[in-house]
Image: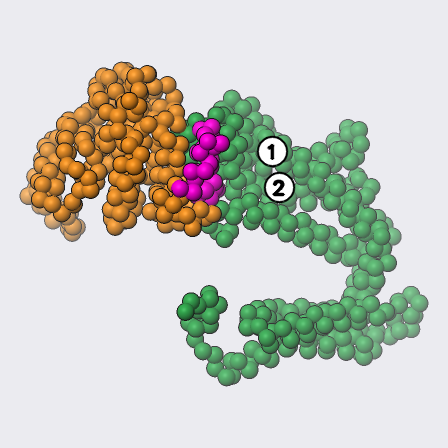
Chain colours: A orange, B green
């Protein structure tokens, strides 16, 4: 079965630019992602979730440990591991159609799959915008185009680095539905980095909660609900509250609100919570 | 019912008062009237007595009358069209003040030179003499334009190609940058025209030397622009391309260069300005052809009308060259927001 990612005792250390200092981004991460699974990596900024994703993509080299993809050790990038970023995800100098063609050509699948381009455009609701340049599209359309471009080369696993992070909440919710639809149709593995708890619950089968400095997996939560899910349901809220409580704890930062308020009062600035 | 953008503009702009409409109408007719007045002034006002006394030395022809006639005819056509098209009307209203000023300046110049002799020959030939010079020397001028353009583009294309090669290479690879940067720092601040005296001595042919000098002037801004352009391409572009399996060739030619195009075109535009300057210097000091040489040569004969003629031709030529460059830029950068 393809689309399996096994992370074994992975650590990543970065050199701080301009000094001899180093920074531990990931510490001893182990995680098995099953083929066809939808996994969300959830955590505050600085917890190393994006680094983990980039290592799976082959853009960063692990310091210690290893990542196996379909049983083999990862070495560099591959069209089998697609990637979608939050911004600059499309090539600005190519039209939507040319963006998809670029993906197919560079992954040497153009001859076999060029007939599928129209279907992908249709699927993304971009058929009439095929000849438009990215700046002529709305943010939501751009991300839809980036999604289908990544899927067009038929990756085993799609790595999503906060792909909906820059969108307004309505566009985001409708794109979350599209994402589920695309995933169910394709059946590939999905690994999504997010800091949006609702998004993680709504989309994923497993939520991997990470804690920062150094990045560790602090908890893995199964979400055994069928799709499509109900954002307004009671157990959705229960799960969200649980994660919220847990993450506050995982933070290990208990604010003394009284002291904080007193501090802001003495400074004389108005606090808007 | 769907509005066109023009209808929307009409609908939303505040209605014009009757006075304003009348004023605008008069404004559209004014350039035509002024050109015709200038024509009448040129034909009817008596010339400066010194010129009238010696018509053989100071001939006056109807070339300028014909030129003004063509101008008036073009304005008349524009005016008639403006009665049928709102868009043309608005554009004419917009440009009319400028046209009026041009017509007035032409009249003033004519009065100051031919009619009153305030500005004397040979330094200030009247418009008719300049026009005659262009027509009389058209064969030679055309030859000069051709030669200038050949030299300009030989140097420009060579410099731009070298600049693209160096700049993209240095922007892409640290190793290439290591060797290019000292060269840029050393040669960059020296205006390329500085080399002319050395080139005049060393170069095997003046043409080749001038091509080299122009190319050197273009090379620097294009290299800098391409270097910065490529070095500043957003990293995620490369990363996404890599996940699609792009090889190094594709990363350079299908990602780095297209993404750096806006910056590269800034360098190309800047380079064109430098190339035009270097061309004139080369032609005035060494090369024995082209418009720069023509001006210098005519100065030797104190043929000021022909010098002015050459200046006008140079202006038209360089404007045309830059116009073409802008067209290419707009076409290549049509994916950029500001060019839509």
Number of other residues with Cα within 10 Å of mark 2, as a class: few under 14, some 14 to 19, many 20 or more: many
Front residue of this view, candidates B16 and B54: B16
**Image point (83%, 59%), residue name:** B135
Front residue of this view, candidates A107 and A17: A107
Tell me residue B16's x, y (percent).
Answer: 47, 79
Which residue is labeled 2 in the image? B271
Q: In the image, B213: left or right of A44?
A: right
Image quarter of the N terminus of chain A = top left
In terms of secondary structure, where does tag 1 sit?
helix
Number of other residues with Cα within 10 Å of mark 1, as a class: few under 14, some 14 to 19, many 20 or more: many
| Quarter of the rendering containing residue A183 | top left
Please determine if labels 2 and 1 lie on a single subunit: yes
The part of the chain drawn in magenta is A91-119
Q: Evaluate whether residue B49 shows in this view.
A: yes
Q: Is residue A102 above or below residue A80?
A: below
**Image point (69%, 50%), residue name:** B318
Q: Is residue B308 above or below residue A69?
A: below
């Amino acid at each position: 079965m393809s689309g399996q990612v096994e992370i074994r005792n992975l650590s990543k250390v970065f050199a701080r630019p301009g000094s001899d200092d180093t920074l531990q981004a990931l510490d001893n991460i182990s995680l098995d992602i099953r083929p066809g699974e939808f996994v969300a990596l959830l955590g505050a900024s600085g917890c190393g979730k994006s680094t983990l994703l980039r290592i799976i993509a082959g853009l960063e080299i692990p310091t210690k440990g290893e990542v196996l993809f379909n049983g083999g050790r990862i070495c560099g990038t591959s069209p089998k591991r697609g990637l979608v970023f939050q911004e600059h995800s499309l090539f600005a100098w190519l039209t939507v159609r040319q963006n998809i063609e670029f993906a197919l050509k560079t992954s040497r699948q153009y001859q076999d799959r060029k007939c599928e381009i129209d279907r992908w455009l249709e699927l993304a609701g971009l058929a009439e915008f095929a000849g438009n340049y990215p700046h002529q599209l709305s943010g939501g359309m751009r991300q839809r185009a980036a999604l289908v471009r990544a899927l067009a080369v038929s990756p085993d696993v799609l790595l999503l680095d906060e792909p909906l992070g820059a969108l307004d909440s309505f566009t985001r919710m409708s794109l979350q539905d599209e994402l589920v639809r695309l995933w169910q149709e394709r059946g590939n593995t999905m690994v999504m980095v997010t800091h949006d708890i609702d998004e993680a619950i709504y989309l994923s089968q497993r939520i991997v909660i990470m804690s920062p400095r150094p990045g560790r997996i602090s908890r893995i939560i199964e979400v055994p609900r069928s799709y499509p899910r109900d954002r307004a349901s009671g157990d959705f809220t229960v799960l969200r509250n649980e994660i919220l409580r847990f993450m506050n704890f995982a933070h290990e930062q208990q604010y003394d609100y009284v002291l904080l308020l007193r501090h802001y009062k003495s400074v004389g600035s108005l606090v808007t919570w | 019912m769907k509005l066109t953008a023009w209808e929307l503009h009409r609908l939303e702009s505040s209605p014009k008062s009757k006075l304003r409409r009348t004023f605008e109408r008069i404004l559209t007719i004014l350039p035509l009237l002024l050109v015709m007045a200038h024509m009448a002034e040129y034909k009817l006002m008596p010339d400066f007595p010194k010129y009238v006394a010696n018509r053989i030395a100071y001939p006056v022809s109807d070339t300028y009358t014909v030129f003004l006639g063509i101008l008036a005819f073009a304005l008349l056509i524009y005016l008639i069209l403006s009665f049928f098209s709102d868009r043309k009307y608005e554009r004419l209203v917009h440009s009319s003040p400028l046209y009026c000023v041009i017509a007035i300046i032409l009249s003033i110049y004519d009065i100051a030179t031919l009619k009153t002799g305030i500005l004397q020959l040979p330094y200030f030939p009247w418009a008719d003499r300049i026009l005659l010079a262009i027509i009389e020397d058209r064969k030679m001028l055309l030859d000069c334009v051709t030669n200038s353009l050949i030299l300009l583009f030989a140097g420009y294309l060579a410099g731009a190609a070298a600049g693209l090669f160096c700049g993209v290479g240095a922007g892409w690879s640290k190793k290439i940058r290591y060797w290019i940067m000292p060269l840029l720092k050393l040669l960059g601040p020296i205006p390329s025209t500085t080399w002319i005296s050395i080139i005049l001595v060393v170069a095997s042919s003046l043409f080749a030397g001038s091509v080299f000098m122009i190319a050197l002037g273009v090379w620097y801004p294009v290299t800098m622009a391409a270097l910065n352009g490529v070095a500043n391409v957003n990293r995620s572009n490369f990363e996404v391309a890599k996940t699609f399996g792009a090889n190094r060739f594709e990363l350079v030619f299908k990602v780095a260069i297209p993404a750096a195009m806006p910056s590269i075109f800034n360098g190309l535009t800047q380079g064109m300005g430098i190339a035009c300057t270097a061309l004139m210097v080369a032609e005035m000091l060494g090369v024995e052809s082209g418009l720069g040489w023509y001006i210098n040569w005519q100065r030797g004969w104190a043929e000021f009308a022909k010098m002015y003629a050459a200046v006008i031709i140079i202006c038209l030529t360089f404007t045309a060259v830059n116009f073409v460059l802008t067209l290419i830029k707009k076409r290549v950068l049509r994916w950029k927001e500001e060019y839509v």
